[in-house]
């Protein structure tokens, strides 16, 4: 058996620290917006050189509150990728705005910057690039287009905490380039909590203050409401766990990158290329944090069945692109509109890549994949 993700291995290595941190919250009996949340916000802002960080209840709410803070509303159009987790487009739609999809780049699974301009109309107000699987979308080109048309950029960095890319002479972390950047602390993320959690980062003090108010129902001062927000706070228990885990994040990321490198070596040794399999690559100037290690596999669904039967867990992110989701039928998209996203939905498969994965487990995964393709040949 090789699990897709084994959080128990991580917990066993840090049980005492985590248990102590959680106990501390119980001892203080302060559960909402206390010292742990403030500490985490300070650490995240400092770690990534973001001016402000605001803890929120999930990555989904990080997106929603960002869009609310920017005043996005009914009739506005927001451009994003059709090949992402549902929350990206869900947040747009919930505000009455219209998700406008552009196809992805076949090499990176990220939004194709060349496809954006054609979709811009007088109703377009924002672009949400998604840094899928831990690799940043091409922010240099996306921000250049956004500037030309005076559009906001909200980064969906839910899967990409710690990723960076070179921009001109410097490099920038995921989440720190757009007007806001949105992180998720869902347990499967590179920095995962013990439940739901998220964070918005922004360099803009006015947006930051708005987000702080929006996460407490738009209240300021308490019980006075200039705007309508939501209950969107990060809680103390989550923040306590995340404060412990944050110091391990860089080490875990390095492990993920080592695993990715080893997979690529095994891929060549096993001759998987001959079977039409392709593995992810890291474009020049980008630092991939491999929240997922997602390749393309012919006969993907049969392969998944073959692997599952033999005790090898994998995951399909994502089987149906967002433009074809039943709830978005009234947006009027059809099959064939985004061929790259549709192809990715048929071929993409993620292999285990959590930090505690062993080399022998990786070897067994690759061997089993090779066995499958030898059989179907
Ligand atoms: C790309 C992307 N966007 C948004 C989210 C939403 O985050 P959350 O699950 O914390 O609400 C996720 C994660 O689940 C995600 O992967």
Image (cartoon, grey):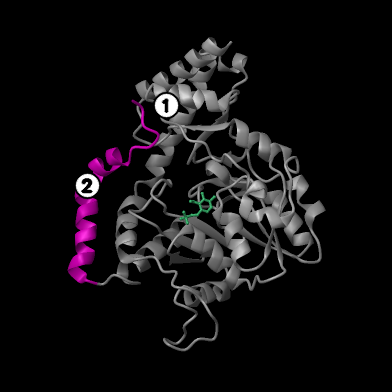
Q: Residue at x 24, y 45 (%)?
A: 14
Q: Is residue 218 left or right of residue 278?
A: left
Question: Is 65 situated above or below 184?
Answer: below
Q: Which mark is residue 328?
A: none
Considering depth in this image, is 307 or 30 the residue closer to the camera? 307
Name the residue beneath numbered marker 1: 308
Q: Which residues are magenta?
A: 1-29
Question: Is 350 situated above or below 36?
Answer: above
Confirm whether residue 114 shows in the render: yes
Question: Where does the image place residue 224, in percent across and percent down from the top left?
Answer: 47, 89
The answer to which quarter of the image holds residue 283 is: top right
Q: Crowdedness of circle 2 by 10 Å Cα count: few (<14), some, many (20+)?
A: few
The answer to which quarter of the image holds residue 250 is: top left
Q: Crowdedness of circle 1 by 10 Å Cα count: few (<14), some, many (20+)?
A: some
Question: Is 361 situated above or below 44?
Answer: above
Question: Where does the image place residue 180, in percent across and percent down from the top left?
Answer: 57, 63
Q: Residue at x 52, y 46 (%)?
A: 163
Confirm whether residue 168 shows in the render: no
**In the image, the residue with mark 1 has its CB under 8 Å from the nearest atom of ligand 1:** no
Q: Quadrant of the C terminus?
A: top right
Q: Main secondary structure of the magenta part?
A: helix
Question: Is 359 situated above or below 225?
Answer: above
Name the residue beneath numbered marker 2: 15
Considering depth in this image, is 118 or 306 the residue closer to the camera? 306
Question: Where does the image place residue 31, in percent across and percent down from the top left?
Answer: 29, 70
14 inside magenta stretch: yes
Considering depth in this image, is 207 or 65 the residue closer to the camera? 65
**In the image, the residue with mark 2 has its CB under 8 Å from the nearest atom of ligand 1:** no
């Amino acid at each position: 058996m090789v699990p897709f993700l084994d959080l128990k291995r991580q917990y066993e290595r840090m049980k005492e620290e985590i248990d102590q941190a959680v106990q501390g919250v119980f001892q203080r009996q302060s559960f909402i917006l206390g010292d742990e949340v403030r500490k985490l916000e300070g650490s995240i802002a400092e770690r990534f050189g973001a001016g402000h960080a605001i803890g929120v209840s999930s990555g989904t709410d990080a997106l929603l509150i960002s869009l609310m803070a920017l005043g996005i509303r009914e009739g506005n159009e927001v451009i994003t990728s059709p090949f992402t987790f549902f929350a990206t487009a869900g947040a747009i739609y919930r505000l009455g705005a219209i998700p406008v999809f552009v196809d992805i780049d076949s090499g990176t699974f990220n939004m194709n910057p060349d496809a954006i301009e054609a979709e811009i109309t007088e109703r377009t107000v924002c672009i949400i690039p998604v840094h899928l699987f831990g690799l940043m979308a091409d922010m240099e080109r996306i921000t250049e287009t956004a500037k030309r048309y005076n559009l906001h950029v909200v980064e969906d960095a839910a899967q990409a905490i710690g990723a960076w890319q070179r921009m001109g002479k410097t490099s920038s972390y995921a989440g720190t380039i757009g007007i806001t950047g949105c992180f998720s602390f869902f347990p499967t993320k590179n920095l995962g909590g013990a439940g739901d959690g998220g964070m918005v980062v922004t360099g803009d003090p006015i947006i930051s203050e708005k987000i702080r108010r929006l996460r407490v129902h738009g209240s300021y001062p308490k019980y006075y409401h200039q705007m309508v927000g939501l209950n969107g706070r990060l809680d103390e228990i989550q923040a306590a766990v995340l404060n412990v885990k944050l110091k391990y994040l860089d080490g875990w990321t390095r492990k993920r990158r080592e695993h990715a490198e080893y997979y690529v070596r095994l891929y060549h040794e096993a001759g998987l290329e001959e079977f039409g399999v392709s593995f992810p690559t890291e474009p020049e100037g980008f630092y991939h944090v491999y929240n997922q290690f997602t390749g393309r596999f012919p006969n993907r669904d049969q392969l998944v069945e073959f692997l599952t039967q033999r005790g090898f867990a994998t995951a399909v992110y994502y089987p149906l692109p967002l433009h074809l989701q039943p709830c978005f039928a009234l947006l009027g998209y059809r099959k064939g509109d985004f061929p790259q996203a549709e192809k990715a939905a048929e071929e993409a498969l993620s292999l285990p890549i959590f930090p505690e994965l062993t080399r022998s487990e990786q070897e067994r995964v690759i061997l089993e994949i090779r066995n499958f393709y030898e059989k179907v040949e």
